[in-house]
Image (cartoon, rainbow, N blue to C red):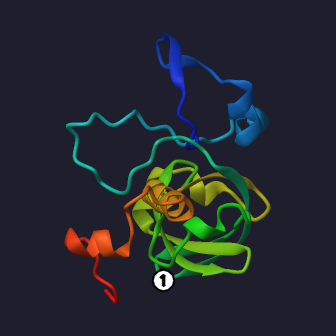
Amino acid sequence: MDGACLTVVERAGEEFWVQASAETLRRTTLGALRPGDRVNLERAMRLSDRLGGHLVLGHVDAVAEILSRRPEGGSVLVEYSLPASLSPFFIEKGSVAVDGVSLTVNAVGSGSFSVALIPETQARTALPHKPPGAKVNLEADLIGKYVARLLGAKAPAGLDEEALKAAGAWAKGR
């Protein structure tokens, strides 16, 4: 729900109930939802399904604020605040999940990033209904998080540039 992975614990007709941990409520916008609020809902993907975006787990990293939005052609350009803790994981033309919607990062600035909501995204998600000042859930790109973690970690003994070159896994300058 809005990018947070939740388990349905009960269903009745078109209604359902979920449970959220204290950690989920601390790290997401879910605790601020009120009856009638629009949310993005998406069922979990099966491993055999075609991937139509980037890997989105529903593990929200932070909450951001919509700073601005403006039309551009049929799209809407939206600028969001970028928490400093997530900045290392954001690159131009990289991926981000905003309220669970897989999007391409158009630009990264100092403390902000922007995306374009194409007409299909506008028609199928709750994102175009959120005004500047509204809060959204962010999930940084999973691969970017792992790469940053690995680059920040100390390499195991014997794993250095020479070992990578010998294994054919080093391509400096590419």
Q: Out of 37 and 154, give the one closest to the viewer.
A: 154
**Which quadrant would residue 38 be assigned to in this image?**
top right
Of 67 and 22, nearer the camera is: 22
Along the horizontal axis of the image, is 123 left or right of 126? left
Q: In the image shown, does 161 or 129 lie closer to the viewer?
A: 161
Give the tally of numbered discs. Answer: 1
Q: In the rendered view, tell whether residue 154 sits above or below residue 70.
A: above
Q: Is residue 102 visible?
A: yes
Callout 1 amino acid: Gly
- Which residue was labeled with disc 1? 73
Q: Within the image, what quadrant is residue 80 found in?
A: bottom right
Residue 80 lies left or right of residue 103; in this view the side is right
The answer to whether residue 29 shows anywhere in this view is no
Task: Say which residue appears at 51% left-offset and 19% top-offset.
Answer: 8
Residue 134 to residue 59: above or below: below
SS for callout 1: loop
**Circle 1 Cα neighbour tier, 10 Å, few/some/many (<14 / 14–19 / ≥20):** few
Quarter placement of the N terminus: top right
Residue sitting at the far front = 158
* Residue at the spot 72% in from the left edge and 41% down from the top edge: 27
Name the outermost residue toward the bottom: 173
Q: Residue at 33% x, 85% y: name it.
A: 172
Q: Quadrant of the C terminus?
A: bottom left
Nearer to the camera, 41 or 143: 143
Residue 45, given in percent of the width and then of the height, sits at 33, 37
| Residue 99 point in image, percent of width and height | 58, 49
